[in-house]
Image (cartoon, rainbow, N blue to C red):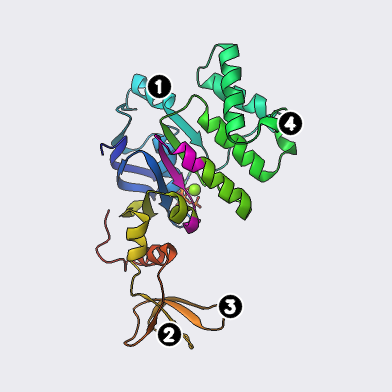
Amino acid sequence: MNPTVSASGLSLHYGRTRALDEVELRLTPGVTGLLGPNGAGKTTLLRVLATAVPADRGSFTVLGHDPRTARGRQEVRRHLGYLPQTPGFHPGFTAFEFVDYVAILKELTDRRARHREVRRVLEEVGLGEVRGRRIRKLSGGMRQRVALAAALVGDPGFLVLDEPTVGLDPEQRMRFRELIARAGEGRTVLLSTHQTEDVAMLCRRVLVMAGGTVRFDGTPAELTARAAGRVWSSTERDPGAKAGWRTGTGTFRNVGDPPAGADLAEATLEDGYLLVLDGMGAGVAA
Ligand SMILES: Nc1ncnc2c1ncn2[C@@H]1O[C@H](COP(=O)(O)OP(=O)(O)OP(=O)(O)O)[C@@H](O)[C@H]1O
Ligand SMILES: [Mg+2]
């Protein structure tokens, strides 16, 4: 499949901090998850792709448009929906007013058509009933949905979602996954998260970032497979474990290099992620 978004050699420094270091990227339609520890560079990468901040070096295209020219940047923005890590709501706005404001910025100038679009996206995220309520009176989960509605205005081909499920209760998170999965039909969605279950349940592809570079690029099943044969349980803490903890049943669950004859356990995507971060995911792809 031809990539809809591709980046090459993207680098960005903040003073001495290398927030992005030669990032290579090829995205195709569907949902791609972006995992990585705090400070890995996820938000920085998403901000660069959303044209909120320019890279120092490297280039990228979104749906064939190159943001290095003013014209190209405008085209990228026209095809983009962005949910930032900390959406800047005006708390006095109603949900409708906020999304309408975003729609104006997205150049939907015809008032009636714009209002129709604002109602459509608010319905889509299940907020049709509360669209007249002030944002400060909405719950955290509802606010996240307002932010998603704003990102969906104008039916963008490329959706950038920075930790959209943070702070949601399990039921809300599941509903949000449904919304994102629907949004990913026919669109390219790049979503950062700290929830490995989000990736396991939602994403077609997964990228793992650390220290400003992409350490893994593959399917969720391939990431899980990195930990095959490397997870085991034991009654005592195992010195060969990179990570090990006592579970609720009293036995230890270990991830790393198992000793001979170890009682192997089934690996999860989180185990694969931990091993990639530890540099143990053999044949780490970039
Ligand atoms: N505006 C800024 N000024 C200076 N340094 C910054 C700025 N934004 C990010 N950084 C630094 O760049 C690096 C990457 O930060 P970034 O926010 O992209 O990480 P992240 O992967 O999104 O982390 P988190 O999971 O905590 O959201 C960090 O070292 C951070 O301190
Ligand atoms: Mg971040």
Which range is magenta?
180-197
Real-space Cα separation, disc 1 to disc 3, in angstroms:
53 Å
Marks 4 and 1: CB-CB under 8 Å? Answer: no
Q: Earlier in the sequence, mark 1 or mark 3?
A: 1
Q: Mark 4 points at which residue?
A: 133
Q: What residue type is labelled 4?
A: Arg
The residue tagged 1 is 74
Q: Mark 2 points at which residue?
A: 238
Amino acid type, label 3: Gly
Q: Quadrant of the N terminus?
A: top left
Residue designated by label 3: 248
Q: Which residue is drawn at 41% across and 72% down?
A: 266
Q: How crowded is mark 1: few (under 14 residues within 10 Å), some or many (20 or more)?
A: some
Category of crowding for the residue at label 4, using alpha-carbon neighbours closer than 10 angstroms: few (below 14), some (14–19), many (at least 20): some
Q: Mark 4 vs mark 1: which is more N-terminal?
A: 1
The local crowd at label 2, few if under 14, some if 14 to 19, many if 20 or more residues have their Cα within 10 Å, is many
Q: Which of marks 1 and 2 is in front?
A: 2
Report whether 140 appears left or right of 11: right
Residue found 36% across the figure and 21% down from its top: 70
Frontmost of labels 2 and 4 is 4
Whole-number angstrom distance, CA of label 2 to CA of label 3: 17 Å
Where residue 73 sits: x, y (%)? 38, 25
Q: Which label's residue is closer to the chain start, 2 or 3?
A: 2
